[in-house]
Amino acid sequence: MFQKLASLEDRYEELGNLIGDPEIMAELDVWQQYVKAHSELTGVVDAYREYKRVTKEMQEAKTLLNEELDGDMQELVQAELAELVLGKADLEQRLRLLLLPSDPNDEKNVILEVRAGTGGEEAALFASDLFRMYSRYAERQGWKTEILNANYTDIGGFKEVIFLIGGRGAYSRLKFESGVHRVQRIPSTESGGRIHTSAATVAVLPEAKEVDVDIDPNDLRIDVFCASGHGGQSVNTTQSAVRITHIPSGIVVSMQDEKSQHKNKDKAMKVLLARLLDRAQEEHHQKMSSTRRSMVGTGDRSERIRTYNFPQNRVSDHRVGLTLHRLDTVLEGDLDEIIDTLVTTDQAERLKQVD
């Protein structure tokens, strides 16, 4: 590990010199690449230099202890050494985490797809609750939310809602939300007070650019039609709704939220690109490992990952055994404790594989 850290520090120094080179600065694209690479190494190099400083101070403290010191000074140096030992251990763990391979999608925006599952209208209302929860969480993070497409029910739920969350690190925080979310509560229409169980499925896709996915225009079939409202009735007489079919994969995306055909087409392409990138990455993962298993689950969207129990004000994440008795605040977007647990568990699992 330390040999790698030393080489990263050398590269960091080299990049710093290149950034200041007038000839490099004249080539803006190259200069920007070097600046980005230098910035990406800053965290790990700073931690490594701090580690080297702490190690040096430990050696100095140990040397002092070998000398004849009075009682107070001996006690002071021993206390300082104990603090340095703890600091060194923390830095070693931090460096191991910093050296883990990063997910290239972590800094991307995300496209979330929430679909009502078993449970009829109650499932659709729960899908609406999940949409609101993620929207509130995005608001807390200072991220932007935009609905791309929504299929509403008559009582205010969602059969399906697709929305974009834009902000730095959005995918890194939300990528473990994919899966089946189960709700247990007494529906407002239930006169007997019985608890019903229903579910919604969440898919989290990194937003893809055209450079991420190679699409042959000849592989696309684009249909336009009149948008429809609840029950299928026509809500306008212009053909503004768009359906794009990617023929090789069979993926179909329909958009009708905008009155403009052009805007609906742009949104449909955004979702199509994300789904194609997600499929390509899934195929790659399966080739790399036939047993994609970890403490945070397989990433399979048919996997039940979390239960929201209203009578007990409880939310339980089944992958990490975390239970919180504050469902009300979680649904208001207070997701950090759950997400932090998922992220640290994933890091711990990956560290085991490296070690």
Image: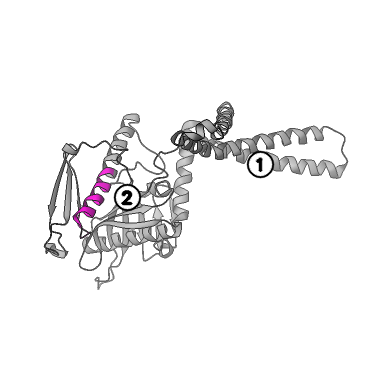
- Find out whether residue 308 is within the magenta segment: no
Residue located 70% across and 43% down the image: 83
Q: Is residue 208 left or right of residue 39?
A: left
On residue 111, the disc is 2
Relative to residue 350, is residue 91 drawn left or right? right
**11 and 48: which is toward the camera:** 11
Rendering quarter of residue 220: top left
Q: Which residue is mark 1?
A: 86
Q: How many marks?
A: 2
Image point (86%, 43%), residue name:
71
Where 98 falls versus 315 (above or below)? Answer: above
Observer-nearest residue: 126 or 275? 275
| Most foreground residue, 216 or 340 | 216
Q: Residues within 10 Å of mark 1 (few under 14, many from 20)?
A: few
The percent coordinates of residue 113 (x first, y second) are 29, 52
The secondary structure making up most of the magenta span is helix
Looking at marks 1 and 2 on the same chain, the residue that comes earlier in the sequence is marked by 1
- Judge from the rendering whether residue 114 lies leftward or rightward of residue 140; answer left or right: left
Q: From the top left corner, tell me how far across and down residue 41 is, in percent.
A: 53, 36
**In terms of image quadrants, where is residue 119?**
bottom left
Magenta residue span: 255-273
